[in-house]
Amino acid sequence: MPSNRTFSTLFLLCSLALILPQCSDKNSDEYYKEGLSKVEAQDYEGAEQAFQNAIDKNPKNPNGYYGLGGIHNYREKYDLAEKSFLTALRIDPTFVDAHYSLGYTYEQMGQKEKADREYAIYRRLKKKMDQYMKEEAATR
């Protein structure tokens, strides 16, 4: 029959096996940044996995969906890109670049009216953002 020491050792090893991965695990933003680095290195499969990891880690992070949508656009999987960008925009309706990218996706899908609507939203939000940044810089 195993001793208490054997059980203690086994318990400690199992605990470490469960705890250590959590200590080194990245957060959602770190996975998103990793995805961007992989896109820059033209490792699109790695980028897709990193963006998916960002989403898995935090389903409310619009950047993960945005990055995933970009990969889908690159691979001409426009229906998946549309879903990714729409999810990003459900989380953050003011995500300027997601509106532009969704417009591009719709353009590629031959949906001109939807594309024009997204581009118009992009221009309106971009103008507001630029004005805000200009005012912010003037107050410093």
Image (cartoon, grey):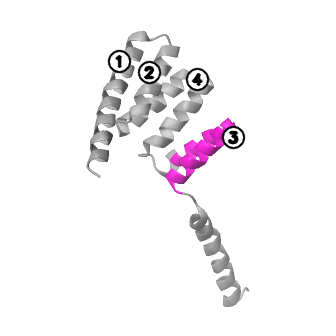
Question: Sequence-wise, which precedes: disc 3 or disc 4?
Answer: 3
The percent position of residue 139, horizontal first and vertical second, equals: 26, 49
Q: In the rendered image, which residue does mark 4 sit on?
A: 77
Question: Relative to 43, is 119 on the left or the right?
Answer: left
What amino acid is at disc 4? Answer: Lys
What amino acid is at disc 2? Answer: Gly
For mark 2, give the secondary structure: helix
Question: Sequence-wise, which precedes: disc 2 or disc 4?
Answer: 4
Q: In the rendered image, which residue does mark 3 sit on?
A: 41
Q: In the rendered image, which residue does mark 1 sit on?
A: 117
54 or 130, which is in the foreground? 130
What amino acid is at disc 3? Answer: Ala
Rounded to the nearest angstrom, the CA distance separating label 2 from label 3 is: 26 Å
Q: In the rendered image, which residue does mark 2 sit on?
A: 103
Question: Sequence-wise, which precedes: disc 4 or disc 1?
Answer: 4
Q: Indicate which label's residue lies in the foreground, 2 or 4.
A: 2
Give the main secondary structure of the magenta stretch.
helix
The percent position of residue 75, horizontal first and vertical second, equals: 63, 25
Rounded to the nearest angstrom, the CA distance separating label 4 from label 1 is: 21 Å
Q: Residues within 10 Å of mark 1 (few under 14, many from 20)?
A: some
The residue range painted magenta reads 27-54
Question: Sequence-wise, which precedes: disc 1 or disc 2?
Answer: 2
Answer whether labels 1 and 2 touch (C-beta < 8 Å). yes
